[in-house]
Amino acid sequence: MRVASGSLQGSVPGSEDAAGAQPVASTARSFGQNTMPLSPLRLRFLVASLLTVSFLGALDHTVVSTSLATIAGELGALELMGWVVVGYTLASTVLLPVLGKLGDVLGPRRVFLVSLLLFLVASLACGFAQDMTWLVVSRVVQGMSSAGLQLMSQTIIAKVTTPRERPRYMAIIGAAFPIAILVGPVLGGAITDYWGWSWVFWINIPVGLVALAFAFVAVPRLGRGVIPRHYDVAGAAAFTLGLVSLVIGVTWASERSGGVQAVAALVVAAIALFAFFVIEVRAPEPMVPLRFFANRTIAAGTALSAIIGVGLFSITAYLPTFFQMAYQVSATVSGLVPIATVLGMLVSNLVTGWLASRTGRYRIFPIIGTCMGAAGLFLMAGLPGGLPLWVPMLVMAVVGMGTGSFMSLIVAVVQSAAPDNQTGAITASINLARQVGSTIATAIIGGSIAFGVARLLPAGLDPASLTPHAVHQASAATQGTVAEIYGQVFTPIFIALATTYAIGIIAALLLPHGRLSDEPHTATPEPAESLSA
């Protein structure tokens, strides 16, 4: 049995045109089921519009972090503070496959514009919040709409570019995330200090309205898919229940505070996710097209996307704490390490996107990138204490460069291996793998740090009150003890993450050889390969 990937004739090996259709001329770009020319000027305008909107969605995930304490204090609900972030993240993750399917059915332009309008309304509601419950609900809506912005931006780019062009433009859109990581916390703190925390959300309104006006003009009316006779409501419900239960269960289990509740949540997650798998296999119109994961390109690309979430995104938030404790540096200085990591990611993301579009070659970049990530994290695990801070900064910059070299590229490659009428669903699946991996790994790492430090601390040191400021004011002996403890706790974490990247090397090697084509939704494989049984 030959596994076909739909409307592509080998944009990457392992895919072919099931209908046997000839590729259209390279002078036109395919819009869904229609083909129409798109001028270079309009394409640049479109990319600028999508980048602005993607940056808004990514920024809203990072800009709130520095204002959380102020928000919780003014609204008087410290115990709900974490849900301002968790609600946003969970909503944006859970809605990915649903929005991907809607984009394929209704057209990505409609989903994109509705998501942008909903995002602006939710931002307005967040700023007017009178209590924490109001804010959390508004943040959930914001997360849902943010998922639509990020996902449809990538889907629209896939619809209006050839496989050869796609990595360059996808890298530009993907640059929104690392830029948001760099400027978000600083911007959020400055807005909170000078304007008030409400403007952390309201700043989206003027920028978003301009982006909305651009989007109405720039985003073309893309072809709609066939309206399904049956919507996969059962699959969506099972997936939502399974993912929410999984995140809650892993969080409780990693904190060693959930007990029976954690076990119950994990059992519910296992049952719901198993039911989701069964539903998707049998559904006539599945929300997640599992059959396409028999394609080697899609399977390997999805694994690589998950490895990015597990291997790097999960540890970034904990790096400042590690360096404040293990290297005895201030909070400001400790932020230099994640900044170096993200800068490396940003630069390599843009460079490899340009190179892949210029040469058509893509396989070498994830191979080199996963090797760099594995080597850098193994080196982090073995760095002795007392080194100047520029050493781990350089090492983590290498990890960031390795990750960025295939972060956006792998999305473009997987899109090229999928049929045109499933672009949204496949794009959602690869993003979903990354976000779920990051969410679960972040919870596990956080719980491991808390448990490990508490277990190793000598008598007389209370882990609940062990802040970087308190440690820096303690005796030299205490500082040395704490530094050694954090080194012991983080070493196996770095080793585990390095092993994740080492597994990624295998996934990268499994990518078929091929060259991205100048033809819309086609490529010239070298040699042509497809999975067969």
Image (cartoon, helix red, strand yellow):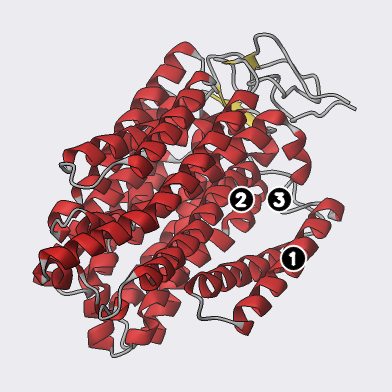
Q: Does the rendering let one see residue 49?
A: no
**Vertical order, 452 against 500 (above or below):** below
- Which residue is label 1 attached to? 233
Q: Amino acid at mark 3?
A: Val
Mark 2 vs mark 3, CA separation in Å: 9 Å
Q: Dot 3: within a 10 Å radius of its alpha carbon, few (fewer than 14), some, or many (20 or more) residues?
A: many
Label whose residue precedes the other's in the sequence (1 or 2):
2
Q: Nearest the camera: 217 or 66?
A: 66
- Residue 1 at x, y = what percent? 90, 27
Q: Which mark identifies residue 288?
A: 3
**Vertical order, 475 against 396 (above or below):** below
Q: Which mark identifies residue 100?
A: 2
Q: Amino acid at mark 2?
A: Gly
Secondary structure beneath dot 2 equals helix
Q: Residue at x 80, y 19 (%)?
A: 20
Q: Does the rendering let one see residue 71?
A: yes
**Vertical order, 402 against 182 (above or below):** above
Q: Indicate the quadrant where residue 163 lies.
A: top right
Mark 1 vs mark 2, CA separation in Å: 14 Å
**Vertical order, 135 against 513 (above or below):** below
- Residue 484 at x, y = what percent? 28, 57
Q: Residue at x 68, y 19 (%)?
A: 13
Secondary structure beneath dot 3 equals loop
